[in-house]
Image (spheres, rainbow, N blue to C red):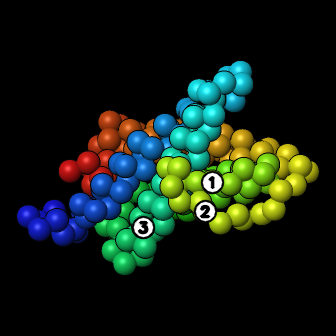
Amino acid sequence: MTATGQRTADSYTRTAKSLHWLVAFLIPCALTMGWTMVNLGVSPLKVKMFNWHKWLGICILLLVTIRSGWRLTHPPPAMVPMPRWQSVSAHGLHVLLYVLMFAQPLSGWAYSNATGYPIVLFGLLRLPDLVGKSKPLAASLDAMHIALGWLLFSCIILHVLAALQHHFIVRDGTLRRILQ
């Protein structure tokens, strides 16, 4: 990385790193909040948590959109040498992570709309409805949102385990590219 934040041959840009770590922090927060709030009884706290969960989801969606645009215009450094099955798996996991980082908040947004609740970002900006109110659709979207949450969580665990394996076992510098 140069002093101006430009990517070197073996490192991501400062912007790419910042977006990665911000999203990496926010997604577990949203997942934890989602899993916690559904087990609460009806209360003002539960309503607040639902709103914060929605707001986090929309912020993640916006950040992932920015991150995707950045990645398209600023290609990542070349992967370190590894067996073909590992590079194909890594690429596939990254693609799946991006798909899930879009699908998860969009399914939550649609679910909220299908239950008849609009999303009003930070209580200030009402977002357009993606779908109309529908109990059967809401039930399907709720199941989809939950399943996508677990799939996203599982993929994040795989991503972290692979990064740690590259760092501590293979020692090939893969993790350092996003850390330094």
Q: Which residue is mark 3?
A: 66
**Residue positioned 48% across, 62% down in the render:** 62
Q: Quadrant of residue 132?
A: bottom right
Relative to the observer, which residue lies in front, 83 or 143? Answer: 143
Image quarter hosting the N terminus:
bottom left
Bin the neighbour count of mark 2 within 10 Å (Cα to Cα): few under 14, some 14-19, many 20 and up: few
Q: From this viewpoint, is residue 135 visible?
A: yes
Rendered view: 122 above or below 84: above
Q: Quadrant of residue 102?
A: bottom right
Q: Earlier in the sequence, mark 3 or mark 2?
A: 3
**Is the Cβ of the residue at disc 3 closer than 8 Å to that at disc 2?**
no
Question: SS for tag 1?
Answer: loop
Rendered view: 70 above or below 171: below
Q: CA distance from mark 1 to mark 3?
A: 21 Å
The image position of residue 20, as x and y in percent, is: 38, 54
Q: Earlier in the sequence, mark 1 or mark 3?
A: 3
**Is the Cβ of the residue at disc 1 closer than 8 Å to that at disc 3?**
no
**Residue positioned 87% across, 55% down in the render:** 134
Q: CA distance from mark 3 to mark 2?
A: 18 Å
Amino acid at the residue labelled 1: Ile
Q: Which residue is mark 1?
A: 119
Q: From this viewpoint, is residue 140 visible?
A: no
Relative side of 180 to 115, left or right:
left
The image position of residue 31, as x and y in percent, is: 57, 38
Q: Quadrant of residue 38?
A: top right
Amino acid at the residue labelled 3: Ile
Bin the neighbour count of mark 3 within 10 Å (Cα to Cα): few under 14, some 14-19, many 20 and up: some
Question: SS for tag 3?
Answer: helix
**Is the Cβ of the residue at disc 1 closer than 8 Å to that at disc 2?**
yes
Q: Which residue is mark 2?
A: 127
